[in-house]
Image (cartoon, helix red, strand yellow):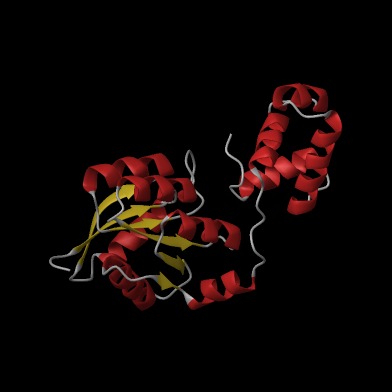
Amino acid sequence: MKGKISILIADDHAITRMGLVSLLETEDDISVVGQASNGNEAIALALALRPDVVIMDLMMPETDGVTATRKIHAALPDVRIMILTTFGDTDDIAHALDAGATGALMKSSDIPDLVKAIRSVASGKAYIASEIAKMLSESPPLPTLTKRQQEILTAVTKGLTNSEMSDRFGITPDCVKDHMKAILSKLGASSRAEAVALALRKHLLKI
């Protein structure tokens, strides 16, 4: 890669952003060109600045890091995205990688590892920290919901009863119950509310 690697930092903690800027600006081949405090800002700045690499936190207000990653990757597939997180939920890390991120690193990593990861991702290579790779390999596969199950769970969030869902989807109330049982079983949930919460957290449901 010719010239400096341009970096956009997306993190809702100002101290974290400032620390990263101070550390990265000491590298001769890296330049921080922008900072975002939430997912919406990250998307807007990525579109405006077109950096080589976006360092993306997963847990941010307004729009989370997974959604921001997906939108940036869809609009700018040549922009590399690296997840930098303290969050230990492998589901979210896996979703971010599925959404287009090519790197994942913990915030507890040493600075040389961070710089190495940035250079690797910027050159078009993938970089998954060993501890994250280990967590991903040990985590169970993500559950999947059928299109009908997604529709029914979405209807639950809108307060529809089994009878109303039966009318809407043209299926019997017993069929609705069967779908709900399958949803609860797949998600390991004990109630409809818990199923909705789990599906949203795992990004299996879009409202």
106 relative to 156 in the view: left or right: left
Residue 160 can be seen in this image = no
Q: Looking at this view, is 60 or 2 the one in front?
A: 2
Res 177 → quadrant: top right
Question: Does residue 158 lie above or below 120 as drawn?
Answer: above
Q: Looking at this view, is 178 or 198 the one in front?
A: 178
> Residue 199: x percent and y percent?
66, 46
201 relative to 11 in the view: left or right: right
128 relative to 206 in the view: left or right: left
Which residue lies at the image location 49% right of the left edge and 54% below the top edge?
58
Which residue lies at the image location 26% right of the left edge and 69% below the top edge?
123
92 relative to 114 in the view: left or right: right
Question: Does residue 40 lie above or below 113 as drawn?
Answer: above
> Residue 105: x percent and y percent?
45, 68
Which residue lies at the image location 38% right of the left edge and 70% below the top edge?
126
The single residue placed furthest to the right in the displayed view is 174
Q: Looking at this view, is 150 or 159 the one in front?
A: 150
Which residue lies at the image location 40% right of the left edge and 72% below the top edge?
127
> Residue 191: x percent and y percent?
82, 42
Q: Quadrant of the N terminus?
A: bottom left
Q: Quadrant of the C terminus?
A: top right
Res 153 → quadrant: top right
Residue 61 can be seen in this image = yes
Question: Does residue 38 lie above or below 95 as drawn?
Answer: above
> Residue 18: x percent and y percent?
34, 56
